Image (cartoon, rainbow, N blue to C red):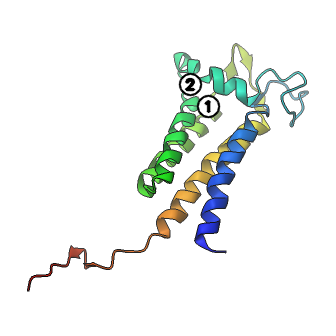
Amino acid sequence: MKNDTLILILVYGSILLALISLSMPAFRFSPDEPLITFSGGHDPYPGILVLILGWVAILEGVVAWYGNPVWLFALYLFFRKEFHASIAFSSISICLGLSSFLVKEINEREIHTMGCGFYVWLTALVLLLLAAIVGHSAIKPNKSLKSGMPQSGAP
């Protein structure tokens, strides 16, 4: 598989999974709730609701939601082919996303486990990082550089 094809699969897979995660439950509050539902049933926190309201959680010290705008910025950098910066911001978005595991309750309801939407969202963050890494590795080195010093035309 060529690098270009792999990069496209990874970056568009990241976008697709991020969109799919919006319809899935982000949290499970009891073991009786289904593992997989699509915006229905008795799960009150689908991904779209978490996306819309999650920014308020900063008031309780929860920063995981901020992985979303950081991921969007990393995606923007990726499409500008600024792979170094995209790798850095993708890594930050993953760290912010992983901080979700530190959250024990939401609105005074104890979280039993993360829902499948959370894991799909987290996978989307990781795919963008992988796309940026592969994109960076696909860059051809500048042939006018030799030993890190630019070549000049003068003797």
Badge 1 is on which residue? 102
In the image, is residue 103 above or below residue 7? above
Mark 2 or 1: the one toward you: 2
Give x and y (percent) for residue 65: 58, 30
Real-space Cα distance between discs 2 and 1?
A: 8 Å
The residue under the point 76% across, 24% down is 45
Residue reaching furthest left?
A: 155
Q: Secondary structure at mark 1?
A: helix
Residue 134 as seen in the image, left or right of residue 85 = right
Q: Are marks 2 and 1 in contact (CB under 8 Å)?
A: yes
Give x and y (percent) for residue 141: 38, 74
| Front one among 33 and 151 | 151
In the image, is residue 29 above or below residue 22? above
Q: Residue 43 lies in what quarter of the image?
A: top right
Amino acid beneath label 1? Leu
Residue reaching furthest front?
A: 153
| Front one among 53 and 92 | 53
Badge 2 is on which residue? 62
Residue reaching furthest top?
A: 108
**Where is the C terminus found, in terms of image quarters?**
bottom left
Q: Residue 30 lies in what quarter of the image?
A: top right
Give x and y (percent) for residue 105: 69, 21
